[in-house]
Amino acid sequence: MTATPLLPRNAPFLPEDIELLNKVVARTTPQQRSWLAGFFAGFEAAQGGGMAQVVPASKPRAPLTILYASESGNSEALASKAKKAAQKHGLDAKVFDMADADMALLAKAKNIVVYAATWGEGDPPARAVDFYQALMSDAAPRIDGVRFAVLALGDTAYTQFCAIGKAIDQRLEELGGVRTFDRVDLDLDYAKKAAEWTEGALAKLAPEDTQAAGGTVVHVDFGGAFPQADDDEPKFTAEQPLEAEISALVNLNGSGSTRETWHTEFAFDDPAFTYQPGDAIGLLPENDPGLVDDLLQAVGLGSDAALFLKLQKSYDVTTLSRAAVENYAKLTGRADVKALLEGEAYPKFASDRQLIDLFLAYPEKLTPEQLTGLLRPLPGRLYSVASSLKAHPGEAHLLVGAVRWQSHGRERKGVASTFLGERRRIGQTGRIYVKPNRHFRLPADGHTPIIMIGAGTGVAPYRGFVEERIADGAKGKSWLFFGERNFTNDFLYQLEWQDYLASGDLSRIDVAFSRDQPEKIYVQHRIWERRADINAWLQEGAHIYVCGDEKGMAKDVDATLVKVLAEPLKGDEEAGRAKLKELTKAGRYQRDIY
């Protein structure tokens, strides 16, 4: 066991400083202490008027291939952080999006770290589909002796929790890879555990001489100011949100609508809160107090006021997952709860039910510790930002559709949407953060035409797109396809779109209101009707954007675009699908789906 170095009592510091420094040093790793040694050596060299000199490593760094499969950007962010952390472990890391990788890359690798998210019910993220299918195919290359480690991200609300990461981990072993660090499967509250896993995996993959030395000295540039945080890493995150004031809260639907869509404006003074059109804003909501009270009553804890506040603000009290049923069965020892995990019993019971249904159907008295042990942290909800910071300095606008329904005799509510729609008022605050989305960005060239496709709240990012282009003086053409139920009550931001059309800031708009006529008309129908013009715009270099529900609108739009692209190619849909993939690879077909 390696002893931790501690400062002696005669060190040239005040006694209280020695005590403080020893507390800090006691928590450091060998790699961190090595970094500090290099840091101070470089600092002293800089103070003497020279640059910090670093003795080059005696051996070249070991290559590391970091692959990620990401839908919302979580895996991508983890991969980026892993690349930076790899340096101190003597690893020369290169990061690859699976969308841009192929099997040749895998065959050449020596060490591999994979960050893989699962989308929906066990699917790979859209951008990673081709790579994933190639990896699972019989044509995948052998990787005998290649060392690897896999981190899987998922959501326990879905039955196929972390299915893609699990499958990749198993497949790499089947192809001859050597699992160097055990896979972890992480839920939405992944940040801390992912950081710990990354550190452990990199330490295992590090060259033996680096492990023995406890790390390497790193270069520190003292030629200017101390290094700042990377521009692509937002200051405000789910772990450190910004408390922002709600300055506007308006229901955009008419009184006769079956919808309820809230335009919400958050105001802030901190210049470090920045975003780009296409990014998402995360909202950390609070639970419905009525549901929290019902839950506590169901488990015999209705009089615990402190626990009530804790559940309202910090725990997910709605999600019914297979993991929750498993843990409840173990905790209570109930055979009938355990039976829910057999065959098709769980999906039948869980369909359109929430956690409280489990406690009501199989009641048991719990202690506060037992109850919170069954719950996961309350996750934030992400919404495409509906504004441009250039057009609205110090503001972030969201478009949030209130979710309400009834099932199994109970009234249900969306956690975040009714938090805004029912329990927040102008002047109150909300906790928000930024989730960058570099795969849903405006073209760098403002002359490039854009085609924006969305239904319902999927129109939100396009408001930000148009505002940004106006602020930048961009002259490229823009075309909006928008769909909703009724023209009179559901035309979100109608007056703004009409003003943009009149000014020429929006070149064209096509709308589809599904319930304004006997036959249902959706945005994909308008796209097909305008297929000749769409192909003409694509010939001019247009970028296409799709935002909305993946299982409904986005899926249908995708299929329609394949047909649109196939028409000039003699109707060959395979050729149309290949063309759509080409546009995706080129960054000209971008989707923000949920």
Image (cartoon, grey):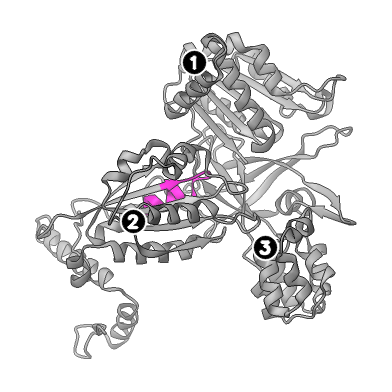
Q: Amino acid at mark 1?
A: Lys
- SS class, disc 1: loop
Q: Amino acid at mark 3?
A: Arg
Q: Is residue 14 toward the left or the right of residue 198 in the image?
A: left
Q: Is residue 231 toward the left or the right of residue 211 in the image?
A: right
Q: Quadrant location of the C terminus?
A: top right
Marker disc for residue 322: 3
Q: Quick one: label 1 or label 3, which is nearer the N terminus?
A: 3
Q: Find out whether the residues at labels 1 and 2 contact each other: C-beta distance under 8 Å.
A: no
Residue 482, quarter of the rendered image: top right
Q: Which residue is mark 2?
A: 177
Q: Is residue 283 toward the left or the right of residue 62 in the image?
A: right
Q: Residue at x 47, y 51 (%)?
A: 116
Separation of disc 1 and disc 2 at Cα? 52 Å
Residue 140 position (above or below residue 525) = below
Separation of disc 2 and disc 3 at Cα? 31 Å
Q: Is residue 587 toward the left or the right of residue 427 in the image?
A: left
Most foreground residue, 188 or 364: 364
Instruction: Report how many numbered discs are placed on residues in the image.
Output: 3
Would you say residue 552 sits in the magenta stretch? no
Question: Magenta span covers which residues?
Answer: 68-81
- Residue lying farthest to the bottom in this orientation: 9
Callout 3 crowding tier (Cα within 10 Å): few <14, some 14–19, many ≥20: many
x%, y% of residue 330? 67, 77
x%, y% of residue 219? 19, 57
- SS class, disc 2: loop
Q: Which residue is mark 1?
A: 475
Q: Quadrant location of the N terminus?
A: bottom left
Most foreground residue, 388 or 459: 459
Q: Amino acid at mark 2?
A: Gly
